[in-house]
Amino acid sequence: MPSLPDGALSTKGRRRALDALGSGELDLIVIGGGITGAGAALDAAARGLNVGLVEARDLASGTSSASSKLIHGGLRYLEMGDIGLVREALRERELLLTRLAPHLVAPVPFLWPLRRRGWERAYIGAGLVLYDTIGGARSVPRHRHLSRRGALAVAPALRHDALCGALQFHDAAEDDARMVAIVARTAAARGAYIATRTRVAGFRRTEGRVTGVNAVDEETGEELVLRARHVATAAGVWTDELRALAGGASSWRVVPSKGIHIFVAADRIPMETGVLARTEKSVLFIIPWGGGWLIGDTDTQWSSAPDEPVATRADIDYVLAKANALLAAPLSREDIHGVTVGLRPLLAGGAASDTTRISRRDVVESPAPGLTTIAGGKYTTYRVMAARLVDAAARALGASNPSVTEDVPLLGAAGLLAARRGRDAFAARAGVSAAAIDALIDRYGDRVQELVALLEARPELAEPLDGARQHLRAEVVYACTHEGALRLEDVLARRTRLALTAPDRGLAAADQTAALMAETLGWSAARTQAEVETWGAMIAAQRAGEAEPDDAAALAAFGATLADRRQAEGGLASAEKRGTRLS
Ligand code: FAD
């Protein structure tokens, strides 16, 4: 299978992927381009299988862009008695931090404030001793006990009366959406075919076995027949829907649990550490992330369709109230930049359960001959989940090659140290500051060389993006030529994280980003304008939802705000399709 050494996810690469998926020569089709599906495509390609991945929307457009962005063992799962899960997650954390993704995953200090004297310190301290012993202290410092004064020295933003002491420990964080794109690129570099905006609409069977899928190319509206010797789903909260489409059966069902985060500027919370605090039902995280603070989350059952979960006023008020119980200078709604909303793909066996108590374990099944599914799990353990899914698919295919991803660094990792050493030379070649190169290395690892080559060829792209000075214009072009971005939303929400981190959620950057994408992807003027208008409508719809008290009202407000836009878009898409057919 020919591979792309740089794993570039371009429109040409997508066309090639669709041709390969239609050829009937693949061993495996993976459905779902979240972290689990991207991980499965990498696992399969690395062990020598011919694999293609289809994603209905964009890479990481589901849950995998809305997590707490922690690569962690999960202290609270220890409390639930899930030591095996925590141990496995800590092993993965270690691998990612040290070998597989040191350019994407970084250690983060956390403070656990203690509210009561006596038993609480002993209880949490014992939990952290266990955490450190089963892997929590590998590659990061061991936990330590702090007095109130010691805690307030590292976290002066906390209220004096919010704690009587604290424990400090370390976990790790990453950019969840960017990491999915890098895993998918690493898969492509190993020969996997990646096709985004390709929605599976049905399954094909030959003599009772699943042998492919019917899909829709969401870029052209074309109906596609994609074939392979085996099909696997890694569809998160869409798992039940796909299983039903395939006519398969299972004793498990997905119970989606909604979680939201808010983002506030760095200077609103002056401290040098993250915070993890217990709430009545779950925990609150205040995480130093993306140049500011990511604060969450919530855990409530979601009973509507999984495509567009929305945050409500109640969700945001809850997070603000929990944070303000700890912070000396309270946050208000005006401090909030962006909000993320995600659905945890939790699995339940019997009747409805309390989502805060459901285990984060994953389940691999074969609900129909020729079809393997995976559901549940956590972002942190994506690599071992992917290996379990591909093990089952490989068994069904009669292949015995084992998973090798433990020894496959993600793209950008291999030459990280050399890239850091070469920063001054890169800066000179690219005509930007050494600090700008550092920022690029933090986002792209050794792939910084591809951006430097682009900047040498097109020096005008070294300017910062309007309304988002932390990003160079070159990054928008690169997102289209190497990271699979096809829509304005893909760049504003997931390749950059402006939808979350910019105070205006990327509105000021939208025009220029769309113009750069238009010249790279060949958009018409009408398409470019439509992309900008859709982004504006999307942000307005999110804000409309966030003003409503509950899920039903927020969904109604969200949908109503987007309705006109969607109608206009439908008209434009069919006009462009007619144009394509005529030309
Ligand atoms: P998804 O990312 O949802 O991917 C499924 C994909 O399938 C989607 O992109 C979807 O578009 C695609 N798809 C669906 N139907 C079709 C179709 N018909 N055709 C083609 N494609 C289709 N885990 C951690 O380890 N650390 C954390 O800090 C953490 N925090 C979390 C916080 C919150 C609020 C939430 C909600 C989850 C958190 N998790 C965390 C869990 C973690 O985010 C998820 O387990 C993980 O992202 C799920 O990834 P996935 O690939 O299985 O699903």
Image (tube, rainbow, N blue to C red):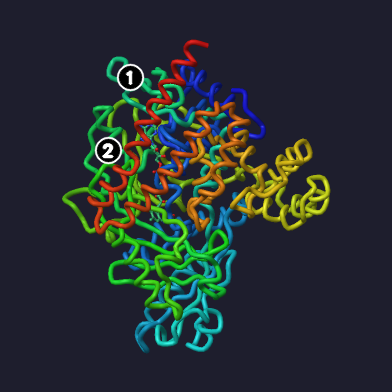
Total of numbered circles in the picture? 2
Labels 2 and 1 touching (C-beta < 8 A): no
Q: Which residue occupies the foreground of this view, 393 or 416?
A: 416
Residue 23 at x, y percent in the picture: 48, 15
The amino acid type, in three-letter code, at marker 2 is Asp
Residue at image coords 62%, 31%: 520
Q: Which residue occupies the foreground of this view, 503 or 282?
A: 503
The residue beneath circle 2 is 240
The residue carrying mark 2 has its beta carbon less than 8 Å from ligand 1:
no
Mark number for residue 276?
none
Furthest toward the left, the residue is 351
Alpha carbon separation for disc pair 2 and 1 = 17 Å
The amino acid type, in three-letter code, at marker 1 is Arg
Q: Which residue occupies the foreground of this view, 68 or 253?
A: 68
Residue 70 at x, y percent in the picture: 48, 59
Residue at image coords 49%, 52%: 505
Asked if residue 345 lies left or right of residue 483, the reply is left
Q: What is the secondary structure assignment of the residue under circle 2?
A: helix
Asked if residue 391 lies left or right of residue 491, the reply is left
Residue at image coords 45%, 37%: 33
Locate residue 430: give its quadrant. Answer: top right
Residue 350 at x, y percent in the picture: 18, 49
The residue beneath circle 1 is 204
Q: Is residue 470 above or below residue 79?
A: above
Q: Is residue 96 above or below residue 33?
A: below
Local packing at callout 1 (Cα closer than 10 Å; few below 14, some 14-19, many 20+) is some
Furthest toward the top, the residue is 582
